Image: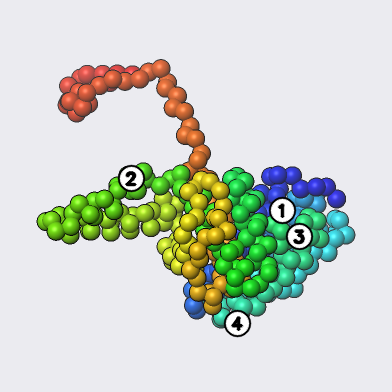
């Protein structure tokens, strides 16, 4: 079996990201969880399309959803798992999308479990890759941030509140490392301690406190606007990660071992770690887009120089337009 190249791996990463987005939506309140059915189906179809391309299977243009399984078995004698459960999912999706039949929460739960099993069984069988090892973090270019995420994974695997707390702190440090280059300099250059001392008892003490609060709010919420993040996810992330003092000045070294941590042990769970990790990876990929250099502007050689007055001047009757 051939090895995956970079393009094929990136496609698998995107497919898993689509599946994980469906997972998040499937846990929303009913009936909003029904939208996950469409994404579950898209992620499965994406994987099937990649599988037949990777295996060299050809489909007819008029093929149906089940044709992926039939063609693969007929042409390559390979049985892709999950044909029955995926047919049930497709039937539910057709009823929802084309007939307005909203699936029940129990149907969504069953689809979620079936699709999870389908990916877990199919990816290693076809691509010789462990599905759990396919991660969006592979798209993060910053090696320091990737190292922090890897160390966080090892700590979280220990499963204790203390180890998860440190793991969550490493996720926070990675987030700051990736985001710090985009902080607006004007938001943190003011020497507020000195200004507060100077303003005591003056008429502008109250005004300074308002300005300081506004700047703090801008610093806190700036990533939401800059990276196009979901506010609820960002808010959950910053509230879950431990508060700490004496950390690094980003970009720089990791948090010092003597750093003082403030955290709530009951929130230091593997579930919250997985949420925070997934949020960080999505934010990192969006931050990467901001590094993309702009395309150079190429002039045609027919640059027009005109004043606004000339552009708005009424055209004389009978005059020919300039070419």
Q: Is residue 92 above or below residue 294?
A: below
Residue linked to disc 1: 50
Give the camera-side residue of 55 and 148: 148
Residue linked to disc 3: 130
Q: Position of residue 115 (x, y in %)?
A: 68, 69
**In terms of sequence position, does the residue under pointer 2 or pointer 1 come before the other?**
1
Give the camera-side residue of 288 and 250: 250
Residue linked to disc 4: 106
Element under disc 1: helix
Camera-nearest label, 2 or 1? 2
Q: Is residue 93 above or below residue 185?
A: below
Q: Position of residue 74 (x, y in %)?
A: 85, 59
Q: Callout 3: few (<14), some (14-19), or many (20+) C-alpha neighbours within 10 Å? A: some
Q: Callout 1: few (<14), some (14-19), or many (20+) C-alpha neighbours within 10 Å? A: some
Residue 10 shown left or right of residue 224 in the figure: right
Q: Distance of mark 2 from mark 4, alpha carbons?
A: 54 Å
């Amino acid at each position: 079996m051939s090895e995956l190249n970079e393009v094929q791996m990136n496609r698998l990463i995107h497919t898993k990201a689509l599946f994980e987005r469906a997972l998040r939506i499937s846990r929303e309140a009913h009936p909003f969880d029904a939208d996950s059915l469409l994404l579950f189906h898209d992620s499965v179809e994406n994987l099937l399309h990649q599988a037949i391309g990777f295996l060299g299977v050809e489909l007819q243009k008029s093929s149906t959803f089940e044709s992926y399984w039939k063609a693969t078995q007929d042409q390559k004698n390979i049985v892709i798992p999950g044909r029955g459960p995926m047919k049930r999912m497709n039937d539910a999706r057709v009823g929802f999308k084309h007939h307005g039949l909203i699936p029940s929460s129990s149907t969504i739960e069953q689809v979620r479990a079936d699709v999870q099993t389908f990916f877990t069984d199919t990816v290693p069988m076809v691509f010789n890759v462990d599905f759990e090892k396919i991660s969006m973090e592979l798209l993060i270019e910053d090696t320091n941030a990737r190292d922090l995420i890897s160390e966080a994974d090892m700590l979280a695997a220990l499963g204790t509140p203390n180890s998860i707390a440190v793991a969550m702190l490493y996720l926070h440090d990675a987030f700051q490392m990736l985001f710090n280059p985009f902080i607006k300099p004007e938001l943190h250059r003011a020497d507020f301690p000195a200004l507060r001392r100077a303003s005591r008892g003056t008429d502008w003490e109250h005004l300074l406190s308002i300005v300081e609060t506004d700047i703090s709010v801008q610093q806190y919420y700036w990533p939401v606007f800059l990276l196009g993040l979901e506010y609820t996810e960002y808010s959950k992330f910053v509230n879950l990660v431990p508060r700490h003092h004496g950390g690094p000045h980003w970009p720089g070294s990791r948090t010092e071992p003597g750093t003082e941590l403030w955290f709530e042990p009951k929130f230091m769970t593997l579930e919250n770690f997985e949420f925070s990790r997934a949020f960080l990876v999505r934010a990192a990929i969006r931050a990467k887009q901001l590094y993309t250099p702009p395309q150079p502007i190429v002039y045609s050689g027919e640059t027009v120089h005109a004043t606004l007055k000339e552009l708005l001047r009424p055209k004389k009757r009978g005059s020919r337009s300039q070419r």
